[in-house]
């Protein structure tokens, strides 16, 4: 199984530059091209939230036009910049996006690794939470398949990032309860999040937690006393998560990579089918 993670696309209305500088629609178009060029291609693409710069039907229509070029199926979860009702209106009618209920959370059962997508959004606020209702729902989903390897995805990282400003921590409530819940379910092989616009890896809930990179403008690793949140000119990226079945000495495992998106020179092949192609 190959799962590609994209996050924080921040699509705006066509012709608009986010913060007056960033063509996020063009950035997503380049990310889609990178994903479509993968060989083999992914089984699924997961968007971990902040689909639009500000949630609206027009922006989600623009996102849908670009993401519709993906060869692989796509699932999305909301972020703090998204609007649940507008998201339902444009991307509803699929087998995965719920059309009723307070939260846009769901389970994808079709692959070697089970994917539980959680809605951590507090409407109108930047940070997220895991309220008792959401924790109860997640516990029920995990309890249904205790023997299946599982990824739990949400927008807000449940851990401290080491950054300053608004990206210091994603969850303002329920983080401790979320950690304790995951420790009761050993089948969780990864927690995937977005929000912080740069790749971060740590341990959480007895497993590995990753905040994935953004397809548009990365945030800098700012740790100083001024509590800065800077946009830096690093390349946008996607996450690629490979389920290796029984290929490793320790058995099945999930391996995660970060792939930059950009206009690069063609690859230089050193080996092909185990044989040397280029000599030094």
Image (tube, rainbow, N blue to C red):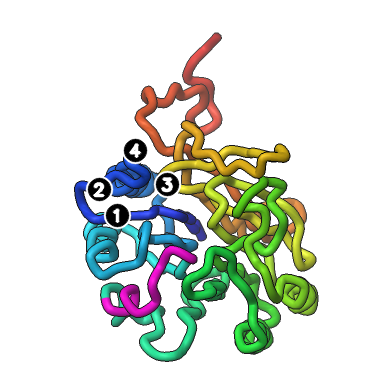
Q: Which residue is mark 3?
A: 215
Which badge, 2 or 4, is on the more N-terminal residue? Answer: 2
**Is label 1 in a helix, a strand or a loop?**
loop
The quarter of the picture where residue 198 lies is top right
The number of callouts visible is 4
Which badge, 4 or 3, is on the more N-terminal residue? Answer: 4
Which badge, 2 or 3, is on the more N-terminal residue? Answer: 2
**Residue 83 forms part of the magenta stretch:** yes
Q: Nearer the viewer, mark 4 or mark 3?
A: 4
Residue 243 to residue 260: above or below: below
**Residue 242 forms part of the magenta stretch:** no
Instruction: Point out the stretch of residues depicted in magenta.
Output: 80-89
Q: Residue furthest front?
A: 226
Q: Which residue is mark 2?
A: 16
Q: Which residue is mark 1?
A: 12
Determine which of the numbered discs, if any, sits on residue 21 in the image.
4
Residue 252 to residue 84: above or below: above
């Amino acid at each position: 199984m190959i799962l590609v993670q994209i996050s924080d696309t921040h699509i705006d209305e066509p012709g608009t530059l986010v913060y007056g500088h960033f063509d996020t629609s063009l950035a997503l178009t380049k990310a889609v091209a990178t994903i479509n060029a993968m060989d083999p291609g992914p089984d699924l693409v997961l968007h971990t939230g902040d689909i639009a710069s500000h949630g609206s039907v027009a922006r989600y229509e623009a996102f849908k036009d670009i993401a519709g070029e993906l060869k692989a199926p796509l699932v999305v979860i909301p972020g703090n910049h998204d609007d649940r009702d507008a998201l339902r209106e444009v991307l509803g009618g699929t087998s995965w996006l719920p059309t009723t209920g307070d939260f846009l959370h769901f389970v994808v059962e079709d692959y070697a690794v089970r994917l539980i997508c959680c809605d951590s959004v507090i409407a109108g606020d930047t940070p997220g939470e895991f309220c008792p209702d959401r924790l109860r729902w997640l516990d029920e989903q995990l309890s249904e398949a205790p023997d299946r390897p599982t990824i739990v995805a949400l927008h807000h990282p449940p851990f401290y990032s080491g950054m300053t400003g608004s990206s210091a921590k994603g969850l303002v409530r329920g983080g401790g309860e979320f950690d304790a819940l995951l420790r009761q379910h050993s089948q969780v092989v990864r927690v995937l999040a977005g929000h912080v616009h740069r790749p971060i890896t740590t341990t959480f809930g007895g497993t590995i937690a990753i905040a994935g990179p953004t397809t548009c403008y990365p945030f800098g690793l700012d740790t100083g006393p001024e509590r800065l949140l800077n946009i830096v000119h690093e390349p946008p990226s996607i996450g690629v998560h490979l389920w290796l079945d029984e290929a490793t000495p320790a058995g099945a495992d999930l391996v995660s990579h970060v792939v930059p998106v950009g206009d690069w020179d063609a690859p230089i092949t050193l080996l092909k089918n185990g044989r040397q192609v280029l000599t030094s």
